[in-house]
Image (tube, rainbow, N blue to C red):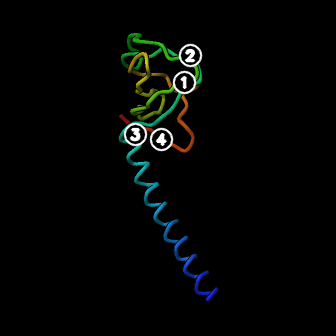
Amino acid sequence: MRKFAAKVALAGLTAAFLGGTVLSAQAQADQVAAGVPGRFIADADILAAPDGAFVGKGWNGQPVTINCQTPDGNWWNLNAPEAAGWVWQPGQVLREWATPEPPNC
């Protein structure tokens, strides 16, 4: 009886693991559709377009939602509490741990 119970438990764990993997992939797809969470890691200017006009300021530690990035990955379009716009990404914004790369705009 113990061997049977151990096999049933192992089968349940395997099914739970596989189910979690499927949900994790779906959760990542949903997260990209809704934007990728991140935060400012330095004070940064938010611009209307890459190299465009100033529209607001992001502050160190402030949470943001990253919508997309330019194909070269240098500019990120995001929503911050003060403004929505573009930020020069290197050294300015960091994605939250274990989140997917933002899609290209």
Which quarter of the image is occupied by the C terminus? top left
Which quarter of the image is occupied by the N terminus? bottom right
Q: Which residue is mark 4?
A: 101
Q: Helix or strand or loop: what does disc 3 sit on?
A: loop
Q: Quadrant of residue 84 in the image?
A: top left
| Crowdedness near tag 3: few (<14), some (14–19) or many (≥20) residues, C-alpha within 10 Å | some
Mark 2–mark 1 CB contact (< 8 Å): yes
Residue 92, percent across and down? 55, 23
Q: Nearer the viewer, residue 33 or 17?
A: 17
Mark 4 vs mark 2: give the one in front: 2
Q: Which residue is mark 3?
A: 103
Q: Which residue is mark 1?
A: 40
Q: Give the CA distance from mark 4 to mark 2.
A: 22 Å
Residue 12, percent across and down? 52, 73
Mark 4–mark 3 CB contact (< 8 Å): yes
Q: Helix or strand or loop: what does disc 2 sit on?
A: loop
Q: Quadrant of residue 42 in the image?
A: top right
Q: Give the CA distance from mark 2 to mark 3.
A: 24 Å
Q: Give the CA distance from mark 2 to mark 1.
A: 7 Å
Q: Earlier in the sequence, mark 3 or mark 1?
A: 1
Q: Give the CA distance from mark 1 to mark 4.
A: 16 Å
Residue 65, percent across and down? 44, 30
Q: Amino acid at mark 1?
A: Phe
Q: Amino acid at mark 4?
A: Glu
Q: Helix or strand or loop: what does disc 4 sit on?
A: loop
* Residue 52, placed above or below residue 31: above
Question: Of the numbered discs in the image, which one, if any, rests on residue 48?
Answer: none
